[in-house]
Image: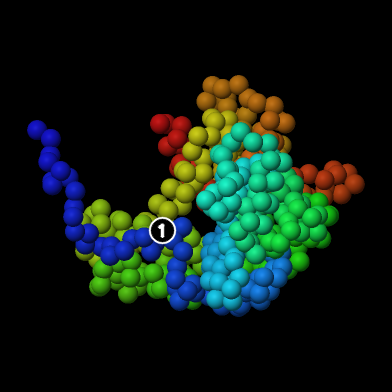
Amino acid sequence: MSSSGDDLFTRDDPIFENKELLEINHLPEEGRIVGRDDEIAELANAVNPAIFGQSPSNLLIYGKTGTGKSLCAKHISEQLVRVAKEEGVTAKFAYVDCAQDSTETQAVQTIAHSLNDSAVTDVKIPDKGLSTSTYYKRLWRVLDTQFEVVLIILDEVDKLDDDDILMQLSRAGEAGKLESCKIGVIGISNKIKYKDRMDERVKSSLCEREFVFPPYDANQLRDIMQARSDAFKDGVLDSSVIPRAAALAAREHGDARKAIDILRYAGEIAQSTGNETVREEYVVQARERAETDRFRELIRGSTPHSRYVLQALAVLALNTADEDGFRTTRIYDVYEEICRQEGSDTLSLRRVRDLLKEHAFLDIIEQSRQSGGSAEGSYTEHQLLEDPDVVRKVLVETDDA
């Protein structure tokens, strides 16, 4: 006989008080943003003219994943909208995840849809079915009808297919597309070299102000986690848990997202084992689980050959720990061996090169051009950004599934 609903579910959570505080997309209150006072002040200074209805500076924010870029950009935008209202200025901001909306059409549709109040503008923004130019025309109408100032945050801007939307947004005013509304663009990228591949005209108009967010140190990570510790019930966190998680995260990446993930997973491990306290020993287990789950999510839906290429790079990284990067031809040799073991035909070197580019796009690997001198010319090296043990473990699981 199956269990009744009362037997299946626990109504009283002994570990978590407010787990939402440990979700990545949770935007903390002002007092909970830790370790970024200087960056917040500088961003505020750059967009300050907007509170008086004037044009804010266009900004480009760089920094590794989990350094608070998106968090601070959203926070500043929210504060600007609030203060502008107090000054009698109608302002709003739009947020676009360019990893999800990577084409020009998708991005402009998302911006227009999120800003439009059709009752005011009498403008419809359908999900699809319009040309890109029509979406732009409707966006300009939405902006001029409703707002004096708008900030547009383009997160992971390097994931856009091209620079066209950057050109349109950053030059909308001077091109006469907008009559009264002023717009400011905040581009956010994990890639410090992103600007190098920009169109020169876009670069001159978009990069008015640039900011680099450094990784968090152990003290800042500890403060970040401490600020969210009321996600847990009183007394369940051992005093050593947060310092240990902060030290681990700072040593490996300085990534606040991963640090918060580790804290949440440690709580879930305590929960699943029936313990009423979150102990330090759970932190190491939680770190491995967080890395494994994140990587599993990254490669979900990837093709067998995409996984074989990654497996080849992981094998090289594990077998030659003294080397950072590996040439495409070396990876291809190991990939051929893996294909033989799997009883699969190999893809061409050119196709493997494309698969490596796709992994670089997802920030699983990093690619760098190297010069071999006059004898060899230049070549590309590929470095795994994930823990090779985690990569191998997940790939073996995936292939066995």
Residue 385 visible in the displayed image: no
The residue drawn where x is 45% and y is 35% is 398
Residue type at the position of mark 1: Glu
Above or below, 184 against 301 in this view is: below
- Disc 1 packing (10 Å; few <14; some 14–19; many ≥20): few
Q: In which quarter of the image is the C terminus?
A: top left
x then y, percent, for residue 353: 70, 36
Residue 86 visible in the displayed image: yes
Q: Can you identify the residue that label 1 sits on? A: 23
x then y, percent, for residue 101: 60, 44
Towards the viewer: 206 or 277: 206
The residue drawn where x is 76% and y is 66% is 208
x then y, percent, for residue 43: 64, 72
Residue at the extreme right: 374
The residue drawn where x is 67% and y is 70% is 53
Above or below, 314 against 222 in this view is: above
**205 to the left or right of 19:** right
Specify the quadrant of the image occupied by residue 151: bottom right
**163 to the left or right of 242:** right
